[in-house]
Amino acid sequence: MIARLRTIAAVVAIALALGAARRAAADEAGAAEEASSPPSAALLVFGVTIAVGGGALQYYAAHRFVSNASASPGWLALSSVGALTAELGGVVTAYWGWRLGENHFLFDRAGAGPIKERRSMALTAVAIGAIAFAVTYVAEGFVFARTFNCETQAIVHSVAGGAAERCAKDQILTATFIELGADAVLLAVAPFAGYGFGYDAAAKRANETHGLRYSLAPAVLADGAGARTPGLLLIARF
């Protein structure tokens, strides 16, 4: 009776282990298929569209504020929203590049091809983006200094307020053009930075997964008396 119960318990354990292994294999296959599929080009187009739309909104709001003497300062706030939207589009394109880099690494590894060095590409793109940021801040500092100079000259020389206001608004429009140029540079380099870091990250993860992996497999086990019963065998794989 005890031997029969042991057999039943072993059969149930084997069935549960096989079911869990089958579900784990299916989940792993699904994840691998998702990771190995290249990112959709629609995601890149979506990011570029967001960036271009944000830039258009930024320019339109700034131009509306400059060209209309009675325009509300809210147009400047709307211009800032457009700038943030353009940067969000850059983030989307960088994510698309990251996914593409991961996909290309999986393709190279599956084809037994050489693992490429892509980190330098990402760092170069980041350096170009950092230079664009630095140039933007320096140029905007110069523009705001000139804006302050417009107000100072108006006070010192008793220039009509309208002339000083037009001078200041012209500097705001100049700053907007500088920001749009920087956003265009960042949008261009974002996919390359994402691609390089994505490829490099996938290569590092692949190197870290090497080692022992354990799994359970059904087997027929023999005890000391020579009796054979079904059971589970722990298998280690390199």
Image (spheres, rainbow, N blue to C red):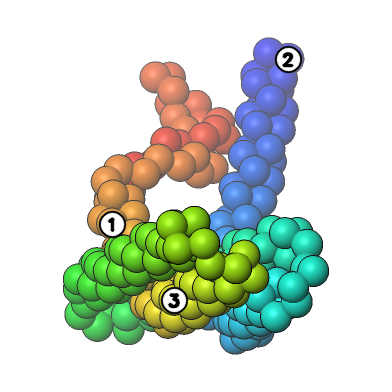
Identify which residue is drawn at 75% across, 77% down.
Answer: 68
Camera-nearest label, 1 or 2:
1
Could you tell me which secondary element the residue under label 2 belongs to? loop
Kindly identify which residue carries mark 1: 204
Q: Local crowd at mark 1 within 10 Å, few (<14), some, or many (≥20)?
A: few
Q: Earlier in the sequence, mark 2 or mark 3?
A: 2
Q: Quarter of the image for the N terminus: give it.
A: top right
Residue under the image location 69 percent in, 41 percent down? 15
Q: Taking 170 as reference, is 76 left or right?
A: right
**Residue with the mark numbered 3:** 178
For residue 53, the mark is: none
Image spot of residue 196 (x, y percent)? 32, 71
Amino acid bearing label 2? Met
Q: Which residue lies under the disc numbered 2?
A: 1
Q: Secondary structure at mark 3?
A: helix
Q: Residue drawn at (52%, 35%), measured in percent from left and top?
A: 232
Across and down, in percent, residue 105 comes to 35, 74
Q: Residues within 10 Å of mark 3 (few under 14, many from 20)?
A: some
Helix, strand or loop under label 1: helix
Q: CA distance from mark 1 to mark 2?
A: 54 Å
Question: Going by the image, does 25 lie left or right of 104?
Answer: right
Q: Check disc 3 and give the amino acid type.
A: Ile
**Looking at the image, is 28 positioned above or below residue 172?**
above
